[in-house]
Amino acid sequence: MTNKNDPNVSPTDHFNVSRIFSIYIVFIVFSLAFTLITIGYINVKKTTLNSYDKFAEIELNLFSSLFNIYIDNHIAALADHAKSPIIINSVMNSGEYNPTLDDVLNEIRLVGKNASFAVIDINNVITQKDKDFSALNESTSARISEVIAEKIDSYFYFKAHHSDNSKLILGLIVPILYNGLSEGALISEVDIDINRILKKSTAINNNVELAISHKKETIYRNPHTNTGKSLIKISPLSNGDSFISVKLDLSYTHESMKNLAITTLFLSSLFMAAFLLVFHFIGRKLFIEPGEIIQKERLKTGNLNKQLVRTNEDLNQFVYVASHDLKSPLLAISQLSEWIVEDCEEILPAESKKHLRLLTDRTTRMQYLLDDLLEYSRVGRFNYEVETFSFTEIVTQAFEPLNNASNFKLHCKSVPETITLPKVPLEIVLRNCISNAIKHHHESQGEIHVSCDIINDTYCISITDDGPGIAKNLHEKAFEMFQTLQPRDEVEGSGMGLAIIKKLVQNYDGKVLIESDAGTGTTIKTIWPTLKDYTHGAI
């Protein structure tokens, strides 16, 4: 890095370095952007084509299903009528014209009045037919023979409609059976309105061309102009001679994708050009002024460190004064009051003795308060090592000195038995919690349950007593400094215990919770992270 204050480095050198570096950065960014655009375009194109392929497949399957159902229903209806005695009789007695047959054929018209029929005997000769029935071609005649010979159950074929391009003619051939034997065939030719079927499918839109072919001859095609690339899907119908094809126009999609790529590349180029100008402008500052900025920050950091050192020295001096200069007069006052009681016990009235005892209690309370204040001020100022130790053992060590009268029972449970935590802070927390449980108990005896569990990568340490409990509306107040929930003349204390606990645990990114209600006992839960690096923590 060049130095702004170096006399051997000219401003031009700074400018050239900045320009070369900015061009280098822009080249890398532009290359990366172009590569990402290319990859994105290929992926979008591939995904779009796959989507259109699936769409065409779905449309083809849907239309084929609808068309086959439409044809199968017509064939089933025609097959039922082919069993009519009049039709059977007209075939078996083909030499005689049966006038009743016309009435029967009028009853079995499948689609409006645009239908025609023919009856064919076993020799493949037309015995009866409508005047509108058209002649059969050679391939259809061969299929009629297969139907009469019962080689196939039925057969359908298509013809182009002579007057309406939106329709086509569907021919249906079914056998005429008598006593289970084929005696001939019944043929029906009906008009089919393709639009009625298309309305049940989404295929009828500007991008889809539908075509129906029979024997390589296109019978029907819905109007559509294909201007470019397309996707074609073909599906055979059940007669084996007819096909349905779906042609999906992709020209608009390809054009849109090409425009998208060109627009994206153009915008990226504009962005790169703007980036070059901005980076070229700020590049000089990046190479000329960073040393000066760093030096200023170093000076500022040095001043802050000096202020922090002075603050710590002042705090240490305060701690020394509080622990010696303030406690010494309190101790002297306490001793003097005790000496007065001893020397003048016989001459002092009862009221004076009571006042002296109160004086002694107040000085003792003040000493406790100073001790707790000192302990509270130390939180966050001293480092304690993380140790692995027995949880049951540390709980027992904290409990035994506090249970002077041996009236309270301790129940300790830990899973696991060995834990890893800052030991000294945990001892302080346990000692304050157990002391509160004994000191604030409404009976002279009771039980204290201490447990440790691992929950969600945290040590959950609970201290539960069977004391009078804490009302829910006082839970937050209990953590405040100098707060006691009972009069100090009844229960001696500084009101700092829970405040110290809260500050200690929070210093290690933990939490403290109270679970209690009036008359139901109290549970103090402290939650300590297990996976945290505690070596930087301090109390």
Image (spheres, grey):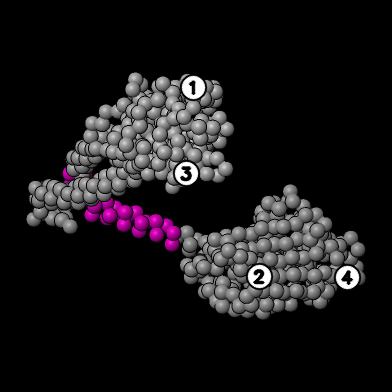
Report helix, strand or loop for mark 3.
Answer: loop
Measure how far apart labels 4 and 1 are at the Cα level.
131 Å
Nearest-to-viewer mark from 3 and 1: 3
| Residue span colored magenta | 280-309
Q: Position of residue 485 (x, y in %)?
A: 76, 55
Give the labeled residue for mark 2.
452
Q: Which mark is residue 153?
A: 3
Answer whether residue 289 is visible to the viewer in this image: no
Please say if 373 is above or below 387: above
- Residue that label 1 marks: 112
Q: Amino acid at mark 3?
A: Asp
State whether residue 137 is above or below residue 354.
Answer: above
> Where does the C terminus fall, quadrant-wise?
bottom right
Pointer 4 or 3: first along the chain? 3
The residue at 35%/28% (across/down) is: 135
Image position, residue 43 (x, y; %): 30, 48
Cα separation, mark 4 vs mark 3, equals: 130 Å
Would you call the spot at circle 3 few (<14 residues within 10 Å), some (14-19), or many (20 or more)? Answer: few
Report the residue at 85% width, 65% height from top: 443
Residue 274 against residue 360 in the figure, above or below: above
Q: Amino acid at mark 4?
A: Glu
**Residue 209, percent across and down?**
32, 32
Element carrying mark 4: loop
